[in-house]
Amino acid sequence: MSDLFVELKTPNGKTYKQPRGLFINNEFVKSKSGETISSTNPSDESEITTVYAAGPEDVHVAVAAARKAFKDPSWRDLDSTARGAILFKFAELIEQHRETLAAIETWDNGKPFSVSLNDDLGEVIGTIKYYAGYADKIHGQVIETSPAKLAYTIREPLGVCAQIIPWNFPLAMAAWKLGPALATGNTVVMKAAEQTPLSILYLATLVKDAGFPPGVINILNGEGRKAGAALAQHLDVDKIAFTGSTATGKEIMKMAAVNMKNITLETGGKSPLVVFDDADLDQAVKWAHVGIMYNQGQVCTATSRILVQEGVYDKFIEGFKKHVSETSVVGDPFKDDTFQGPQVTKTQFERVLSYIDAGKKEGATLVAGGEAYKNVGGKGFFVSPTIFTNVKDDMKIYREEVFGPFVVISSFKTEEEAIQRANDTTYGLGAAVFTQDITKGHRLARLIEAGMVWINSSNDSDIRVPFGGVKQSGIGRELGEAGLEAYTNKKAVHVNLGNRL
Ligand code: NAI
Ligand code: MG
């Protein structure tokens, strides 16, 4: 086997061929510099393997491949139903390789295997199919003007799209971005997060067999500041779609200005979950747990700030603590009963611990967790599910995104206060409201500044429904029909039907 592939065995006993190269023009190649990045198993801190890391010179080659493919009749002039068929075939291949993809995802990222297999891979397949179905249902419009003029619009692809994805849902974030970009006829250069480089390369092995012409999908690993920045600044890239931190999103926006790229940004959050006195408390407790503890708390829409009305504050905390202690089983992500695996990297692990320190120093009350969880063989980046109460609005732990199994709880008196405090943040991604009063529920849905509001649930997002933020949580929408708008232009065509001048 060449150095571009390595045979690996996953912790659940699957042997497979892991690609290590950059995927350009339907082939794996080495990086020009020969530089590599290392992939770590966060459960035991061991190195899984290394993969080639793209530098600016490799980015250049990938962008040129994507540009060539964009103009090539094999993709540009492809019948729209045939384009959809390639995407359907891609989804079918992913389904066939589902177990392997899920095992790699869990090995490299640390999320429970059952979650990778059912939730993440289910979402990947669902998203690709959803957009496959749209490929031949993207219509322009005829616009009535006068009998002497025919005016119509064409929805055309943007061109070469750079897509930079994070490590918390590697394959799912890839699917969210690939689906709409490809259904609308764009070509793609995707950069995966350096913390989770493996699953995306395995996904790349399915691209050619699905029938995508060379250069339509290019997939690179590489560091953000090198490969990512090279993409954001590249003069021949038409669009950049990014999911990650707000700080990096701002950097990308600046870099994208160089040639006025179209941008979609999906960034951070400190989403509130508001529980009113009249809520169904059992429901509130269950969703509040999922809303912050799912995926090790590494979810951009995590409802990480819980506001509870005074009348049920003590009861909610009691129920929530009990539910977290019973449900959030921390452990080996390949074990069936594990709800929470390790944080993705040492950096993220230390970041969560530093917020635990900050919470203690700021004088909040630690009612659960609050330390590294060392019962999994003494190694790995595990954190026990952490709950702080009596949290004040000016505390760092109340204001900043932690991105871990870490939640802050505070009480409020009135509806007005709840709205004001829910909105007292620079972010605006998600929000959840628990009340049995439908009028109040819908009223808050309008008044809370967020891209998404859940009434009596949290984080049950759906690939058919738009996803994205307001304020410093991002620009633009992914998923649903709205996701197509992020990848098309409306071209206007004016036809003179008479002798008008
Ligand atoms: P990050 O935003 O720096 O990384 C996300 C992606 O951007 C990665 O692919 C990375 O390589 C790339 N990137 C980094 N710097 C870049 C640059 N200068 N130019 C172009 N691309 C660049 O996030 P990071 O450092 O991994 O995590 C830090 C925090 O970000 C987390 O603790 C969390 O709060 C937040 N985050 C939010 C995510 C979300 O889903 N919205 C996902 C991941 C992180
Ligand atoms: Mg890893």
Image: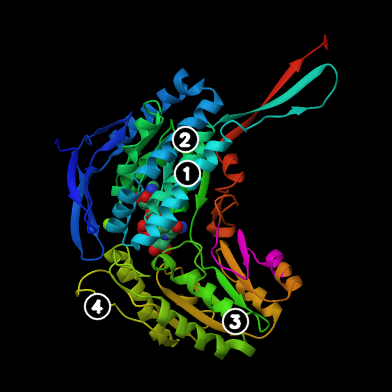
Q: Which residue is mark 1?
A: 177
Q: Is residue 216 magenta?
A: no
Q: Please name the amino acid that badge 2 sits on.
A: Leu
**Mark 2 residue element:** helix
Q: CA distance from mark 4 to mark 1?
A: 37 Å
Label 2 packing within 10 angstroms: few (<14), some (14-19), many (20+):
many
In the image, the segment drawn in magenta is 444-461
Check the image and tell me how it is coloured: rainbow
Instruction: State which tag comes first along the sequence, 2 or 1.
Output: 2
Instruction: State which tag comes first along the sequence, 4 or 2.
Output: 2
Label ID, residue 87: 2
Q: Please name the amino acid that badge 1 sits on.
A: Lys
Q: Please name the amino acid that badge 4 sits on.
A: Lys
Q: Which residue is mark 3?
A: 281
Instruction: State which tag comes first along the sequence, 2 or 3.
Output: 2
Q: Nearer the viewer, residue 336 or 458?
A: 336
